[in-house]
Image (tube, rainbow, N blue to C red):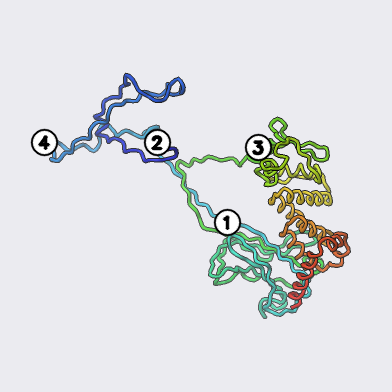
């Protein structure tokens, strides 16, 4: 049966090998396979159909006393392994590797001056972030860790998991918001044991006068950013390779190969027309990438039998980017666009991704828009997220609007006016979350 595997029968013993007659080519070898149909069979050596010799008889009596014992070594050695010379020596190599995971978390403390005065030993904690399968958080003590450290702020990396022992390297640092540089305040370059016994790292102390110095650049617009770069060290793994040999496997070329297939008129079986521009494509590829394309080409829709499809309400460069992603799973590069043009193109691409139910592309667009989110465009982005059924982007926009102190700027934008007119239910959600945020913050 195809794919079945059986262990080979044990080979003959040395004693049996010495008694076997030489293999002779048989006068005729019946075979179901035709040598004319399979020319490679002509080169196969003849196989002997002689039955195997009977096993040797067992010796029940000891040899007579006159027979001398066998010498330690005979002139006829055992048959050696095929392809190996008597002088070959087997060399093996083992390799010990350490599994590790890295991550960076930035903790932004808004309205820093209002955090002061909460008392020695009290702290504000960052959101929980995960690195190496463990949960972590950053503690910030504005008024000091203990009475002894009063007047100096403290930063502390906390392991949130109970009854856990972790080896880790870390670097706690302050972000200079004026220059973008980062100054380390506490770091460990050798693996350090962190666990339930100590809870986390040793608190890093910072002179508050130096921290609040305007020329230092750490606090800008009453906002302080603390960053933690963390490396979690896992267990060791030992692998063994005979002969120290290995085969280097190149990275996948699937994306590159499919990228070459894009816009190939010779193999294309469908053509899209977008505002007069023509884009040849392949129905099978698009059907595999989008359920909407699959319904168009293999369902009951009229496009099933058509080789020319006109696409409405999509810009040519946006549809071209959508096809590029469908073939390569990559976002195109728009290096010649300004920031505003880039953001607008990504917005249109998010709408197109929603139209063709390409969820990964939609989330990639949402993550790009998140990088450019500010008070001027958050309302427009929120309306777009609601229109395109992107709840993750909606949540981020709502949390952003609830937490910033520039709501007057948001309300003055055209995007807010459109949001108020076309998406009133979303504004209700914004107001509710803002109220909860303010209440929690004031408490």
Q: Which residue is mark 2?
A: 88
Residue name at image x 78 percent, y 67 percent: 430
> Quadrant of residue 99 in the image?
bottom right
Q: Which circle marks residue 66 in the picture?
A: 4
Residue name at image x 45 percent, y 42 percent: 242
Does label 4 or label 2 sit earlier along the sequence?
4
Q: Secondary structure at mark 4?
A: loop
Q: Which residue is mark 3?
A: 257
- Marks 4,1: beta carbons within 8 A: no
- The Cα atoms of the two marked residues, 2 and 1, are separated by 38 Å
Does label 3 or label 1 sit earlier along the sequence?
1
- The Cα atoms of the two marked residues, 4 and 2, are separated by 40 Å
Q: Which circle marks residue 100 in the picture?
A: 1
Lateral position of residue 236 relative to residue 415, left or right = left
Graded by Cα atoms within 10 Å as few (under 14), some (14 to 19) or many (20 or more), the crowding at tag 2 reads: few
Does label 2 or label 3 sit earlier along the sequence?
2
- Marks 4,2: beta carbons within 8 A: no
- The Cα atoms of the two marked residues, 3 and 4, are separated by 79 Å
Q: Give the percent coordinates (x, y) of residue 378.
A: 81, 60
Lateral position of residue 66 relative to residue 235, left or right = left
Does label 2 or label 1 sit earlier along the sequence?
2
Lateral position of residue 74 relative to residue 42, left or right = left
Q: Give the percent coordinates (x, y) of residue 119.
A: 71, 80
Q: Secondary structure at mark 1?
A: strand
- The Cα atoms of the two marked residues, 4 and 1, are separated by 71 Å
Whether residue 367 is situated above or below residue 257 in the rendered picture:
below
């Amino acid at each position: 049966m195809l794919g079945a595997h059986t262990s080979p029968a044990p080979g003959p013993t040395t004693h049996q090998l010495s008694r076997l007659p030489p293999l002779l080519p048989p006068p005729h070898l019946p075979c179901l396979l035709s040598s004319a149909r399979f020319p490679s069979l002509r080169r196969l050596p003849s196989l002997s159909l002689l039955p195997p010799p009977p096993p040797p008889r067992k010796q029940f009596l000891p040899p007579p006393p006159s027979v001398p014992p066998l010498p330690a070594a005979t002139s006829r050695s055992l048959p050696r392994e095929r392809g190996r010379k008597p002088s070959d020596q087997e060399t093996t190599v083992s390799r010990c590797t350490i599994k590790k995971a890295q991550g960076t978390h930035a903790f932004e403390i808004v309205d820093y001056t209002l955090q002061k005065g909460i008392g020695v030993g009290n702290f504000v904690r960052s959101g929980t972030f995960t690195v190496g399968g463990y949960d972590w958080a950053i503690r910030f003590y504005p008024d000091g860790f203990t009475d002894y450290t009063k007047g100096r702020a403290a930063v502390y990396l906390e392991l949130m998991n109970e009854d856990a022992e972790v080896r880790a390297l870390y670097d706690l640092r302050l972000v200079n918001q004026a220059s973008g540089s980062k100054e380390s305040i506490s770091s460990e370059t050798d693996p350090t044991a962190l666990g339930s016994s100590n809870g986390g790292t040793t608190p890093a102390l910072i002179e508050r006068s130096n921290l609040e110095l305007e020329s230092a650049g750490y606090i800008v617009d009453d906002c302080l950013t603390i960053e933690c770069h963390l490396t979690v060290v896992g267990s060791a793994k030992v692998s063994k390779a005979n002969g120290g040999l290995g085969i280097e496997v190149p990275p996948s070329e699937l994306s590159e190969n499919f990228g070459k297939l894009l816009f190939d008129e010779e193999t294309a079986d469908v053509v899209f027309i977008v505002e007069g521009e023509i884009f040849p494509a392949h129905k099978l590829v698009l059907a595999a990438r989008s359920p909407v394309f699959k319904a168009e080409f293999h369902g009951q829709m009229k496009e099933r039998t058509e080789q020319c499809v006109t696409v409405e309400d999509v810009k040519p460069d946006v549809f071209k980017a959508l096809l590029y992603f469908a073939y390569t799973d990559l976002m195109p590069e728009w290096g010649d666009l300004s920031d505003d043009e880039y953001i607008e193109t990504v917005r249109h691409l998010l709408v197109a991704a929603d139209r063709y139910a390409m969820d990964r592309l939609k989330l990639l667009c949402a993550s790009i828009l998140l990088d450019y989110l500010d008070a001027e465009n958050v309302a427009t982005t929120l309306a777009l997220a609601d229109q395109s059924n992107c709840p993750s982007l909606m949540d981020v926009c709502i949390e952003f609007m609830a937490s910033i102190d520039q709501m007057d700027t948001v309300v003055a934008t055209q995007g807010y006016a459109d949001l108020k007119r076309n998406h009133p239910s979303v504004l209700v959600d914004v107001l509710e979350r803002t109220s909860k945020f303010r209440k929690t913050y004031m408490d």
